[in-house]
Amino acid sequence: MTIDITSFFFNSSIEGATATAAWGTSIGQNQSKACRIEDEKPGVVDLLTGMLYRSVSDLSRIDISAGSSKREVLLCALFDKVFVNEKLIDGISFTILLVRENTESHAGRLLISYPPYARVDGKATNSDAIKAMAEQLGCTEKGCWFVHDISVKNQDELHFSAVVVDPSKPKIYHGKSKDRSKEWARLVDDKNEASLEDLARILNDMYIHAVPLKQIAMVYAFVFTYGNYLVYNYKPAEVLKASGIKSTILPDLEKAYEIYRKVAKGGISLYNTGRLSLLEVASPAAQTIYYGCPGTGKSFTVRKIAEGENDEKIIWYEKTTETDKSCKKIDWMPSDEEKKNLTNNIFRTTFHPDYDYATFVGCYKPVKEAGELDYTFVPQVFTNAYVCALRHPEDPVYLIIEEINRGNCAQIFGDLFQLLDRTDGVSDYAIRPDTELAKYLASENVPSESLRLPANLHIYATMNTSDQSLFPMDSAFKRRWAMEYMPIDYSCEKASKFTIEVAGKKYSWTKFLRMVNGMIVNATDSEDKQMGEFFIKSSITEKEFINKVMFYLWNDVSKDLYNPHRVQAPYFLRVKNRLETEQNDYFTFAELFEERNKGSRLLIEFFAYLESKYKENHPDFSFAPAEPEVDNASPTEAELGNE
C-alpha cells in the first residue's frame, strides 16, 4: 500500500518551518461514506488481511502512550518477518495499527498507523526495527531516508519500500513542504524503475559490448550513471552475481561505489534522471566472440546473457500465419506443450566445414504443397533473427553462433560482412538483398529494399581456441567483433566439487587441472590446448575419465610427441615409479586398457608423476585423494554373529 510520502521519514526538515512525520496514512476519511475503509485503494485489503492474520488479541501488551490520546486502536498486528527493499532483516519485529481518529477536524477517520514509539511487552520493537532498517539501507544515525510503501505478502510478511536521500547527513529543503514531497515522489519513480534485474541487465550489456580495454571503464560509468538507483539499494556483490559477469571485476565495482558515495556526499550529482530503457542506456549493440580453451563456460555464458539461468529472459511470441504477420508477444510463461506452437527471440546455429551462405541466410528449396511440388524461398537462422528484430524493436533478439571458427566465415557471411560495421548498434552501411530474399522480406511485412542490422539484434559467437580451424578468420573479420577471453577458473565453486574416481578413491578435478595444464603448455608451447573447469560437467568415474580426459590428452596433446623409437622430453604420459619389469616410464593411451594398468596402476602413478612435477614450484601442494566416508552405524546382529 502506498503511504503518504512524508509520513514515515527521518532526518529531514524544511528551512524556517516545521515538517514532522505523521506516522500514519488515511484509508477512510470521506464523510459522505461515513469513513468506510477505502478497499479500492491498491494494497489496502492485503494489508488488512495480513493484520488480521498477525493480530494481537491482548491489547494491553501494546504501549502507544507516547502518541496522541485521540486515536482509538481498532486492530493491532505484530509482524516478526520484516523486509526492507526485499531484504529480510533477522531478529526484529514491527507493530502496525488500525486506528480511528477522534478529533474535531477528522472525526471518525481511519488510519494505518506505524508509530516509531510503539512498544510490545515493554520492549521498543518499532524503534529497534527502524534502526535495523537504516543499517540495512547503509544509513548512519543522521542519514536521511523515507518509506513510501508498506505492504503485506503471504499474509505474514511485512514489506517496507524505502529510498535513501543522503546516507550520512540530514537533508534540509528550501521552500515549502510540497516541494520536498515532489522531489521525493520523483525519487520513488526513479527507484521503482530500477529493479535489481534491470540494473544487472544494463551492467551486463554495457560490459560485454565494450572492447576489452574499456570494460573496466564501463563498470565505473555504470555506477556513476545509475548510482541513485544502485548504491543505497543493492550491494556490489549481489548486482555482480545477478549480472552473470565473472567475479574478477568486483574490486572495481566496489571502488566505483565508494567514489560515488564520496562525490554524492559532497552534493555533486552524477546520476541520470531520465527513465531507464535498456536500448537507450546500454552501450551500442554489437557482435561479440567469446573465446578460450575447451570447458571454460563460453556457451554457458552466452546462454546466461541471452536466456537467463532458468530461461526467464526468453521472450515468447505467437507464430505468424499467411494472414497475420504481427507475431504478437505473449504475457505469460508458456508450458512446454504451448512452446511447441510459439517462437521466441533466441536463434541458434553451429558452424561447420560444410556450412555456407544458403544455410545461414536461406535459399530456394523444393516444397510440396497440396500434393504439388513447388520451389519457394526457405529462410534460415540469420533471416529469421533479422525479421524478428525488425518486428520487435523494443525487445533484444539474439543470434548465437557456436563454433564460429569451424566454418568458412567469408563464404558464410558473404556480403553480410559489410553489415558488421555498426555505430550505436546499427549497421553503418546498408546492402541490397538479392531478389529472392527481398521478396521474402516483403512477404513478411518488413523493409525489403535494403538490409541494415538494427540496434536490438545481438550476435554472439563462441570460439574454441584448441580447435584446428579449417578456415582461419582473417583480421578484417575479427576486427568487427568485440573479443572476450574466457580464462580458466580454478576456484569455480561448482567445478571444485567435481571428483575423479580411480581405484575406489576420489581425487579433486580442479587440482588435477592445475597439475596437468602446466604440462600441456610445456608440451604444446601454447595455452590453447589446456582444459577448462567445465571440460567435464560433473564428477566422473574411472572409465569416463579414461575415455574423455585421457583420450584428449593423448589424441589432441601428446600423440605427436610420441614415437616408439624416440619419445620427446615434453611427453608427459608417464609414471613416477617404474617397475623393475618396465623398460620405460612413459605409457600410451592403449596401455590403459592392458595388463600394465591392472589395479589402475598407470593412472595412480600418472597422478603421482604430475604431483611431483607440480610440487617443484608449489611445495605445499597435495593431490592426496579425499578420505572415504566412514560408516559409524552400529553393527547388526547378523554381523556380530559372523565375528
Image (cartoon, grey):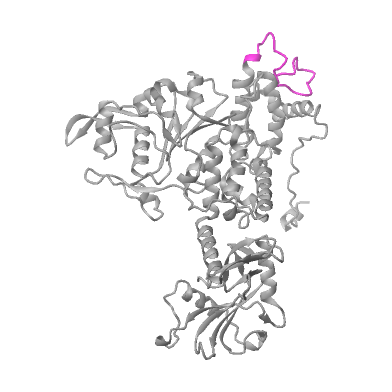
Could you say where residue 535 lies in the image, as x and y percent from the top left?
60, 33
Q: Is residue 575 left or right of residue 108?
A: right
Magenta-drawn stretch, dominant element (helix, strand or loop): loop
Q: Is residue 371 left or right of residue 516?
A: left
Which residue is pictured at 57% across the width and 74% down the height? 7
- Please identify the residue farthest to the top as the structure is shown: 565
Which residue is pictured at 39% across the width and 53% down the height? 334
Which residue is pictured at 68% across the width and 46% down the height? 255
Q: Can residue 89 be seen?
A: no
Could you say where residue 587 lies in the image, as x and y percent from the top left?
69, 19
Could you say where residue 187 lies in the image, as x and y percent from the top left?
54, 61
Could you say where residue 41 lies in the image, as x and y percent from the top left?
44, 74
How many discs appear? 0
> Is 520 or 380 nearer to us in this picture?
380
Residue 74 vertical placement versus 451 (above, below) = below
Q: Classify residue 343 by image quadrant.
A: top left
User: Magenta segment range?
Assistant: 560-586
> Is 186 or 232 nearer to us in this picture?
186
